[in-house]
Image (cartoon, rainbow, N blue to C red):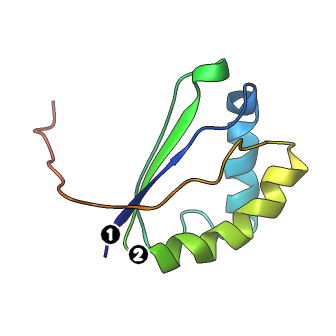
Amino acid sequence: MAITLLFEPKAGADAQYDSVINALKDQGTWPPEGLTYHVASGTGADFKVFEVWESEQHARNFGECLKPILQKYKIELPHEPRPQPVKNTIKGKSL
C-alpha cells in the first residue's frame, strides 16, 4: 500500500538540504527504491519535505540510510513522520 510522509524539521534544515541530497547520491542511495514522489519546499521554519512511497517498508529501509546523514548535518525532526495511507492521487496537465 502506498503511503505519504511529511517531514517538518526544525528551522535551518533548508540550508543543509542540498548537502543531504548530495551525500545520499554519493553513497548511491538517491533516489531510493520505492520512492514515487519527493517535494521539498519553504525556507527557515516553513521548510518541509513531502514524500510518496510505494510501501511503508520501502520508506523504513531508506530511513536507515537517511538517519546517520541527518545526524551528520545536525538536522533535527521534532517528531518522526507518521506514515499515512494514500487515498487518491491526481496528476494535473503539464504546462
Q: Quadrant of residue 13?
A: top right
SS for dot 2: loop
Residue at the disc numbered 2: 55
Residue at the disc numbered 1: 2
Would residue 88 appear left or right of 75 to someone viewing this image? left
Q: Quadrant of residue 26?
A: bottom right
Locate residue 27, reporting x and y percent: 75, 68
* One can see residue 17 in this view: yes
Instruction: Work out whether 72 lies above or below 64.
Output: above
In primary-sequence order, the first of circles 1 and 2 is 1
Q: What is the quadrant of the N terminus in the image? A: bottom left
The residue at 53%/41% (across/down) is: 49
Locate residue 22, reporting x and y percent: 71, 51
Locate residue 41, reporting x and y percent: 50, 30
Q: Quadrant of residue 17?
A: top right
Label 2: how many Cα within 10 Å (few below 14, some 14–19, many 20+):
some
* One can see residue 33 in this view: no
Would residue 43 appear left or right of 10 to someone viewing this image? left
Question: Contact (CB < 8 A) between labels 1 and 2?
Answer: yes
Would residue 46 appear left or right of 10 to someone viewing this image? left
Report how far apart the C-alphas of labels 1 and 2 lie in the structure: 5 Å
The residue at 71%/72% (across/down) is: 64
Instruction: Work out whether 54 lies above or below 40.
Output: below
Q: Nearer the viewer, residue 35 or 77?
A: 77
Identified by mark 2, the residue type is Ser
The residue at 65%/21% (across/down) is: 45
Identified by mark 1, the residue type is Ala
Q: What is the quadrant of the C terminus in the image? A: top left
